[in-house]
């Protein structure tokens, strides 16, 4: 909304002989600041009629009405506006289409995935673990609209990857000695020198069997997950489909109220992957790591 513009040139409204009086100039200068503040207040009142333009004071009023306790450190004004709007527009009955619309509004189009386990009456929603400041609002929304027998499970995911490439070179073998002239220990009998590249890394050559084999090898190497640098989780569920390794595990609220870092470790305690995230933990969350193994060349400087 465009700001209200008031004519604050008050001295121009006075008769000419008053404009030269210093007292009146000072009065006009003081009143001009008050008129500008008034214009801002009028604009603020008009903006507070609409949730999309509502100012901080308007949002805080609606948050008090709904009993929302905001976290200004992780929630910006834009998110708080849409949370209030979401509370007003959240109405049953529950349908997947209505849920998809709400997820688009709260998380963003294309940034989430819904899986329904019908036999177990469980609804899984996957979205990036990098910054889940919307997680509590998503949980509130789903619990408001879903049937009571459906269990909601938040599934933040972390994706890393492994790139494989192959380069083939033809080597030129140089023999350092002739028969009868070999001085033992001074030089190797023969030296291989680079000659020419016959196959570049960018040219595809790696087959599916190798990609799947590497994914299975990495699966066997991952022994545990570590949350926030201190919480060790050894109960991991691991699966490999084609060339993609998937690792899942559960984090309970009794272990931590929020997740800020996630690591995967091998049996010796070496860190294999490390990610900075933000995931509030309600009752429980199911963390999901996906590690695809693909053929490709890493881009330098990216």
Image (spheres, rainbow, N blue to C red):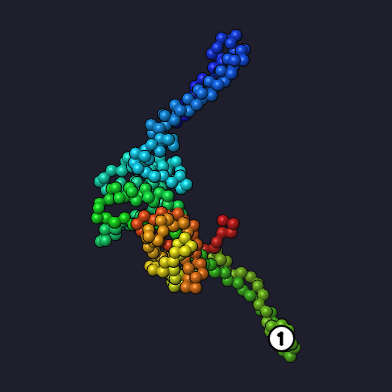
> Can you say whether 54 is above or below 145 in the image?
above
Q: Quadrant of the N terminus?
A: top left
Residue lying at 43% horizontally and 46% vertically, measured from the top left: 71
User: At x 26% / y 45%, what residue is drawn?
Assistant: 92
Residue 66 screen position, x and y as percent: 34, 41
- Among the 4 quarters of the image, the one containing residue 203: bottom right
Q: Quadrant of the C terminus?
A: bottom right
Residue found 54% across the figure and 63% down from its top: 297
User: As drawn, which residue projects farthest toward the bottom?
Assistant: 180
Helix, strand or loop at label 1? It is loop
From the image, tell me which residue sits under label 1.
185
Q: For this view, does 274 lie left or right of residue 190?
A: left
Q: From the top left corner, tell me how far across and down residue 18 is, in percent.
A: 58, 11
In this view, 34 is above or below 69: above
Residue 82 pos. (x, y %):
39, 41
Residue 292 in view: no
Is 208 left, or right, of 23 in this rendering? left
Q: Is residue 254 above or below residue 94?
A: below
The answer to whether residue 266 is seen in the rendering is yes
**Which residue sits furthest front?**
23
Q: Position of residue 276 (x, y in %)?
A: 49, 57
Residue, x 72% and y 88% (percent of image)? 184
């Amino acid at each position: 909304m465009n700001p209200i513009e008031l004519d604050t040139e008050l001295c121009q409204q006075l008769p000419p002989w008053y404009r030269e009086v210093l007292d009146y100039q000072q009065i006009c200068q003081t009143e001009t600041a008050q008129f500008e503040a008034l214009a801002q207040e009028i604009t603020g009142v008009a903006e507070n009629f609409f949730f999309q333009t509502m100012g901080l004071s308007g949002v805080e009023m609606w948050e008090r009405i709904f009993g929302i306790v905001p976290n200004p450190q992780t929630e910006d004004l834009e998110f708080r506006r849409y949370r209030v709007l979401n509370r007003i527009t959240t109405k049953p009955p529950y349908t997947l289409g209505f849920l998809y619309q709400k997820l688009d509004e709260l998380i963003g189009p294309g940034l989430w995935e819904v899986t329904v386990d019908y036999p177990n009456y469980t609804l899984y929603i996957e979205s990036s673990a990098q910054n889940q400041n919307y997680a509590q609002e998503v949980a509130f929304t789903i619990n408001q609209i879903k049937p009571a027998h459906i269990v909601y499970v938040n599934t933040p995911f972390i994706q890393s990857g492994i790139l494989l490439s192959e380069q083939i070179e033809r080597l030129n073998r140089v023999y350092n000695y002739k028969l009868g002239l070999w001085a033992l220990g001074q030089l190797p009998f023969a030296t291989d020198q680079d000659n020419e590249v016959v196959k570049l890394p960018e040219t595809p050559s790696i087959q599916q069997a190798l990609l799947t084999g590497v994914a299975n090898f990495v699966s066997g190497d991952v022994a545990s997950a570590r949350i926030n640098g201190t919480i060790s989780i050894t109960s991991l569920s691991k699966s490999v489909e084609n060339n993609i390794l998937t690792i899942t595990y559960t984090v309970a609220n009794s272990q931590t109220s929020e997740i800020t870092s996630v690591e995967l470790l091998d049996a010796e305690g070496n860190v294999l992957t490390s990610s900075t995230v933000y995931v509030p933990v309600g009752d429980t969350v199911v963390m999901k790591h996906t590690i695809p193994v693909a053929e490709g060349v890493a881009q330098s400087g990216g």
